[in-house]
Amino acid sequence: MGERSRIRIEIEGVVQGVGFRPWVYRLAHEYGLTGWVTNSKRGVEIEVEGSEASRSAFLAALQTPPPLARIDRQTVRDASPKNGDPTEFVILRSDNGSADEITPVTPDAAICADCLRELFDPTDRRYRYPFITCTHCGPRFSIVTGVPYDRPQTTMASFPLCTDCSAEYQNPLDRRFHAQPIACATCGPHISLRNADGSTMTVSDPISAVIGRLESGEIVAVKGIGGYHLACDAFNAEACNRLRKSKLREEKPFAIMVRDLLVAREIACVSTEAERILESPQAPIVIAPKRIASEAMEAIAPSNRTIGIMLPYSPIHHLLFHDARFRALVMTSGNRHDEPICFEDDDALLRLRGIADCFLVHNRPIHVRVDDSVVQMTQCGAVPVRRSRGYAPAPIRLNTRLNRPVLAVGAMLKHTFALGVGDRAYVSQHIGDLENAATWRSFVDGVARYEKLTGIEPDLVAHDLHPDYLSTQYAEQLGIRTVPVQHHHAHIASCVADAGYDGPVIGLAFDGTGYGDDGTLWGGEWLLVDGENCERVGRLRTLRLPGGENGIREPWRIGASMLETVFDDSWRDYRLPIERFFANDEWSKLRRYMNDTTLTPATSAVGRLFDGISAIAGVRGAISYEGQAAIEFEQIHDIAADGAYPFVVRRSNGRHELDWEPMVHAFVDDLVNKQTIGAVSTRFHRGLATVVADITEQIGRDTGITACALSGGVFQNALLLELLVPLLRMRGCRVLIHREVPPNDGGVSLGQLVIAGRKTR
Ligand code: ZN
Ligand code: ZN
Ligand code: FE
């Protein structure tokens, strides 16, 4: 036997509140080591004493942590035994008394395999208990009310543990050791059923009652982990149509929850990677190609060839599917139209009245709204669309260091904010569009909450250049130093940080409109970005926005102004499909102000180019959600069609300008010659991808920069991404795309954070 000696191991990462210490405890016992484990400020500290062989076996085993844990960094050094060292291995209480002790709160996680087995095991004491959970799964972030993370600081505070639960909670060898949200039917929360008017219904088994109602085509509001869902049978066209109507004719696709992977494969084309993401503890909505066409599917995702699916992630979801005849449920956010998702019971009963036929509720409060996360599958891998439940508030590790604590307040639509210090960035859950009182409150409360949870007190705040964004106004009244960050610079910095890249890049910021540093509306820019430095080296030829940003909801205005630019008023002779979207007097009114730069501002936004083209093709003249015209124009493409539209590149003062005028000529020719919309869409995408690759390659040659970063909402367009990325790679570019935060404005806060952190070094 080798000589006994002692080592000290410090671990950083997601290692608190995920069952890490009891797992270490079990390992130490297994290898016959003495010592201790405890939570520390930065993560977990361990000291073990024993033979060389058992110490190295222990270190090797540490490399495969429990499901929810993630080791970012580990240091090992020799330690000397001290008097009073324990003669066995113990879990030391973390020193909750000290003010700087911060136990990171982990994201909410889908039910684990062990809990799922117990849920349907008639001999288990939690058989069919809707709130079964353990160290490896269940709600976290959504129920935490304060720090340190401990049961009294969660919405489980009002449910004292019974003797059995308490024994599990105190036993280091139990899977529920120190799992804060555990409960059972004796001591924990319960579900109940409410009528359409919110009054309590007395039923012996709310789950089977709800199953019956869903099977008969009713709409049920279901209280979940981070908010309410509205559910109905996804194969019942009438129910789906009724739900869409009662949500105020919203046309945004609904997500559906499928019973299992078999049903997922029946409804959508799911790749191996998609399956892995569906089954992950994060359990996001995964957008994949639709496989079946039916009236119900059309009601669920109108004019869409993709569908958002997810697997059951809470015990309540599993109970609903277990005994039911339905195999898939629409599970759309419980809200009306553009409002944020309901998460408070009284509010839900009020706002969802008139939509839901009944409410499946429970008495475990949701402390903070956390929407379902959304990931889009593309041939270039999975791209996040919304980072929320399951992901927030896990920190994103930066490749650069922030020397001061920074707050970044994000943009306005699809809003998130971020807090960071050192090499950690905490990007908030999806807040929503900052344009009503409820999202404003989520934002302001959210900042305070994240400051408390992370212990970061910012002395610097980064914000968008746009003076009208509420987030900008919020930043300005904080009374700390402000750092304005240009919107598209932030997009690119976000993509670079997301990819963990270090070095200068050619940034392609293709977006909706954002405020440029010259006061005009940008959104189709080539930027040379090297940390805090940003130079604009190319752009889309500007388009005119008749009626300004308020006209964005009517893409036909952009289409008409593009046609006017190219053909003057002779385009009306072509009788193009766009004519159906407006009345003559509407256009003649707007046309009068075409040269008034206040009423008809110019923008280089690629998002607006898509809007205009979609309208000209007759696909979409007015929209009910952001990006709808562009999305539908993409979805309609026919990849079998050949050809690509010509664009022209001009160069002045070393800056490239992508001119769309020749494309419009070819496009209109095709429409006049009755080419299919599918072919027209493909030719547009292919032409755009080609010219964008040309410009990028030229910039690369001029500057010697070989990496390029793709960011901005336009890169949610899977077709454009899939056409462009291979072209760029073929020309020797290293292409960075988003993996952690979305390319849309939900990722802007991360970019702001990094730029502000570097500007003030
Ligand atoms: Zn579990
Ligand atoms: Zn109990
Ligand atoms: Fe943007």
Image (cartoon, rainbow, N blue to C red):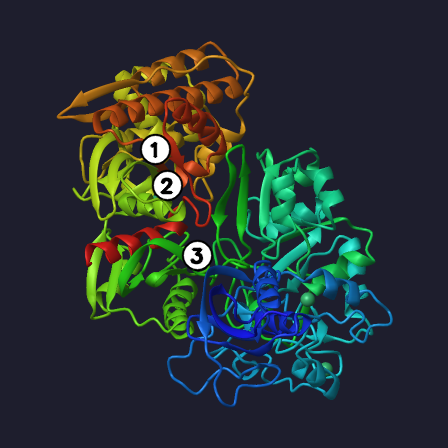
Pointers 2 and 1 in contact (C-beta within 8 Å): yes
- Cα–Cα gap, marks 2 and 3: 17 Å
**Residue in the picture at 28% in, 60% down:** 402
Q: In terms of secondary structure, where does tag 2 sit?
A: loop
Number of the front mark, 2 or 3: 2
**Residue in the picture at 65% in, 38% down:** 270
Measuring from the top left, give residue 109's x and y in whole percent: 60, 62
Is the CB of the residue bearing disc 2 within 8 angstroms of ligand 3? yes
Number of the front mark, 2 or 1: 2
Which corner quadrant holds the N terminus? bottom right
Q: Nearer the viewer, residue 289 or 218?
A: 289
Is the CB of the residue bearing disc 1 within 8 angstroms of ligand 3? no
Given the image, on which type of amino acid does mark 2 rest? Gly
The residue that label 1 is drawn on is 606
| Residue 555 makes an appearance in the image | no
Numbered circle sitting on residue 712: 2
- Cα–Cα gap, marks 2 and 1: 10 Å
The residue that label 3 is drawn on is 432
Position of 246 compared to 500: left or right? right
